[in-house]
Image (tube, rainbow, N blue to C red):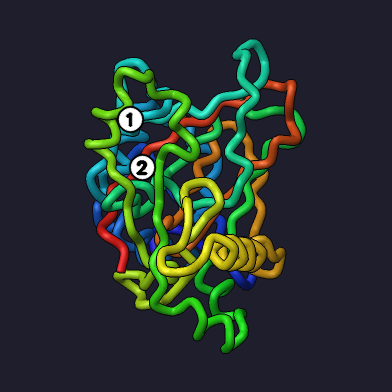
């Protein structure tokens, strides 16, 4: 390989060394994609590249989305800015376990996040192997949830950011989506948990009480440390994760220090 791979845990994650994201070839990107599928989360440190190179790197893996509800970088709409603390006046951190943009008809294949301003302590991101979390469910739970469908809705997180006079237009553009509770990965065939407390409003065909019970049980599976890895950020650290087979949560233990991250998101396909 054109780079070295160092697993973070036996469950999920690997650090990649010996690679320069400013001059990566398509052949190296294909090698990296295979390792990405195996480990689900890749950490690549010390990459002082430009925003344009960040975008170009993301495009090696597919078309990039423009997020309609978040702050995007001026001049680079493909870059989502995730910022809190310092003088920003913001304290929101995506600390709930989730996969990105599951409220889309074709949610993200993968996300590539960069540490731009990193607090001196705290601000880590945790990642969970959604396939391993599913595998460790009891047979009774698997039988209970296999085949169920969940409703995903951007309004749960982003509804407050949409002006009242635009709500009908945005709802028409981004209707609620129905995705399987247990998703099959289109490349590896693995099956994994695909619900999350942030974007999943409920599970179809069951009572509200049972829906809540199932969602909480699946969240507990994702929250088990035995299926996770944790990444400590440094400036110009890049982390790329497969949203089809991994979930993530940031920690809000850095405030009031300043933390700025920049993300590009690779468009995926409809879950099945």
Counting from the top left corner in percent of width and height, residue 194 is at 46, 63
In the picture, the quarter occupied by the C terminus is: bottom left
Seen in the picture, residue 78 relative to 267 is either above or below; the reply is above
Q: Which mark is residue 68?
A: 1
Rate crowding at label 1 as few (under 14), some (14 to 19) or many (20 or more) other CA atoms within 10 Å: few
Instruction: Please tell me which residue lies in front, 13 or 3.
Output: 13
Is there a contact, CB below 8 Å, between mark 1 and mark 2? Answer: no
- Image point (38%, 51%), residue name: 110
Counting from the top left corner in percent of width and height, residue 98 is at 52, 51
- Image point (63%, 39%), residue name: 233
Rate crowding at label 2 as few (under 14), some (14 to 19) or many (20 or more) other CA atoms within 10 Å: many
Q: Is residue 252 left or right of residue 70?
A: right
Residue at the farthest front position: 207
Inspect this view and state whether residue 39 appears.
yes
Picture quadrant where residue 259 is located: top right
Seen in the picture, residue 116 relative to 231 is either above or below; the reply is above
Kind of element beneath mark 2: strand
In the picture, the quarter occupied by the N terminus is: bottom left
Picture quadrant where residue 149 is located: bottom left
Q: Is residue 18 left or right of residue 74?
A: right
- Image point (28%, 40%), residue name: 174
Kind of element beneath mark 1: loop
Picture quadrant where residue 162 is located: top left
Q: Which residue is mark 2?
A: 265
Residue at the farthest bottom position: 139
Instruction: State which tag comes first along the sequence, 1 or 2.
Output: 1
Counting from the top left corner in percent of width and height, residue 135 is at 55, 80
In the image, which is nearer the foreground, mark 1 or mark 2? 1
């Amino acid at each position: 390989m054109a780079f070295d791979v160092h697993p973070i845990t036996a469950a999920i994650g690997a650090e990649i060394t010996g690679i320069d994201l400013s001059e990566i070839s398509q052949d190296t990107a294909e090698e990296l994609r295979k390792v990405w599928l195996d480990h689900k989360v890749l950490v690549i440190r010390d990459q002082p590249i430009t925003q344009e190179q960040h975008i170009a790197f993301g495009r090696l893996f597919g078309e990039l989305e423009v997020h309609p509800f978040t702050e995007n970088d001026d001049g680079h709409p493909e870059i989502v800015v995730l910022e809190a603390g310092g003088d920003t006046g913001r304290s929101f951190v995506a600390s709930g376990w989730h996969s990105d943009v599951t409220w889309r008809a074709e949610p993200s294949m993968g996300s590539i996040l960069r540490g731009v301003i990193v607090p001196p302590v705290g601000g880590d991101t945790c990642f969970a192997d959604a396939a391993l979390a599913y595998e460790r469910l009891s047979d009774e739970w698997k039988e209970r949830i296999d085949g169920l469908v969940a409703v995903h809705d951007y309004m749960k997180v982003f509804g407050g950011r949409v002006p009242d006079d635009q709500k009908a237009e945005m709802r028409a553009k981004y209707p609620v989506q129905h995705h399987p509770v247990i998703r099959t990965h289109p490349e590896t065939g693995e099956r994994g948990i695909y619900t999350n407390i942030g974007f999943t409003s409920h599970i179809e065909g069951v009572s509200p009480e049972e829906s809540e019970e199932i969602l909480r049980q699946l969240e507990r599976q994702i929250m088990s440390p035995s299926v996770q890895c944790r990444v400590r950020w440094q400036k110009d650290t890049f982390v790329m994760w497969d949203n089809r087979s991994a979930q993530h949560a940031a920690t809000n233990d850095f405030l009031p220090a300043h933390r700025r991250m920049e993300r590009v998101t690779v468009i995926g396909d409809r879950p099945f």
